[in-house]
Image (tube, helix red, strand yellow):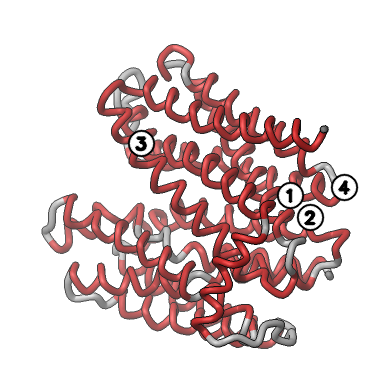
Amino acid sequence: MPKLMVTLFSVAAGLAVANIYYVQPLITAIADEFHRGSGETSLIVTVTTFGYAAGLVFVVPLADIVDRRKLIVTLLSIVAVIQAVSAAAPSITVLTVVSGLVAASAVVAPIMVAFAATLAAPAERGGVTGRVMSGVLVGVLLARTGGGLVAQWAGSWRAVYVAAAVLMVVLALLLHRKLPTVPVGARLGYGGLLRSVVAIVREEPVLRLRCLYGFLSFAGFSAFWATTAFLLAGPPYHYGEAVIGLFGLLGAVGAYAARVAGRFVDRGWERWSTGALLLAVLLAWGLMAIDGGGALLPLMAGVVVLDLGVQGVQVANLSTIYALRPEARSRITMAYTGTYFLGGAVGSAVSGAAYAAGGWLAVCAAGAVFAVLALAIWAVQTLCRAR
């Protein structure tokens, strides 16, 4: 697979996934314009989350039965139109509804990852998957930071949606010209397609195992980001929103980890690299627990190690499961990302309850439990194979 084509996939996946994160730094500005409280305004984020989950379940599997190039271009065109509507939203109710529709249509990133895995040769699949995933991670980071910067520069949160709509139009035109047409592998009706996902999960133990790793690793990751703002806003840090947002840029290391993990998988080291990455996640929670989270350098080091471990596990998981059934990669993607997403929701809920009950150390304990469970499963699987 040519490097330029891999770069195109990486950039496209990042720009597509950014659409569901632009709103996060804009919440306060939206609340001020529509004179609404934080509870009502934060509902936009909740609806966006559920919309994306719906897209993962009902849209992503379509890539196994329709032309991927046409599906991707169509989805990006829909996103462009809806983002334009978001920019002109006359009320918070309209903005909330269209945010859910955008999220359901913006599931291009997982489709692009599976598409890249299909085009790549077996010997390079892990590396290619890692590079495309790095684009997804960078897209998430730049959406959160760039969205706030564009809104501040333009003087309006609406400018962010205008820019997003223009980007999607340009991206759709580019991908329409550059993406190859690949023959459809599966000949199924839509109902049969969704039912086949259940059959694939039942028949593939490796997929079930990797879904479990994804669930537990992303649960811990979400547990951290769900409550870190409370830690950084309180003593001894007293950071403002801008600094807390920039703190997330430490996650850029995860983009690098994604590429490195893919190379290890290509060399046949997926089992041992997974164990090492899960151990890194556990180490990260230990670092972030030092002095109750009050030591800045260990906390920053913990964030870097946590992101490296979680994103590395993500790439190892995807590279492994994409070798299972080439004709069903989009359905496999749906099964994995759905489980992964569910883990994030569980981790966020557990983290909120833990922080309310015992502060930051309780959050670290909860995250460590997720990591220990994943490591225990890995150890049992490794021992069973050794026998």
Look at the picture and state if 217 lies above or below 328: above
**Numbered tag placed on residue 350 in the rendering:** 3
Mark 4 or mark 3: name the one nearer the start of the chain. Answer: 4
- Considering every residue shown, the one lying at the far left of the view is 35
Per the model, the C-alpha gap separating discs 3 and 2 is: 34 Å
Relative to the observer, which residue lies in front, 309 or 7? 309
Look at the picture and state if 24 lies above or below 252: below
In the shown orientation, is residue 31 left or right of residue 349?
left
Q: Position of residue 200 (x, y in %)?
A: 62, 65
Residue at (58, 53) in percent of width and height: 137
For discs 1 and 4, the disc positioned in front in the rendered view: 4
| Amino acid type shown at disc 3 | Val
Mark 1 or mark 3: name the one nearer the start of the chain. Answer: 1
Where is mark 2, residue-wise? Answer: 127
Secondary structure, mark 4, is: loop
Residue at (71, 39) in percent of width and height: 274
Where is mark 1, residue-wise? Answer: 259
Q: Are marks 1 and 2 in contact (CB under 8 Å)?
A: yes
Secondary structure, mark 3, is: helix
| Amino acid type shown at disc 2 | Gly
**Numbered tag placed on residue 267 in the rendering:** 4
Q: Residues within 10 Å of mark 4 (few under 14, many from 20)?
A: few
Per the model, the C-alpha gap separating discs 1 and 4 is: 13 Å
Q: Position of residue 162 (x, y in %)?
A: 39, 74
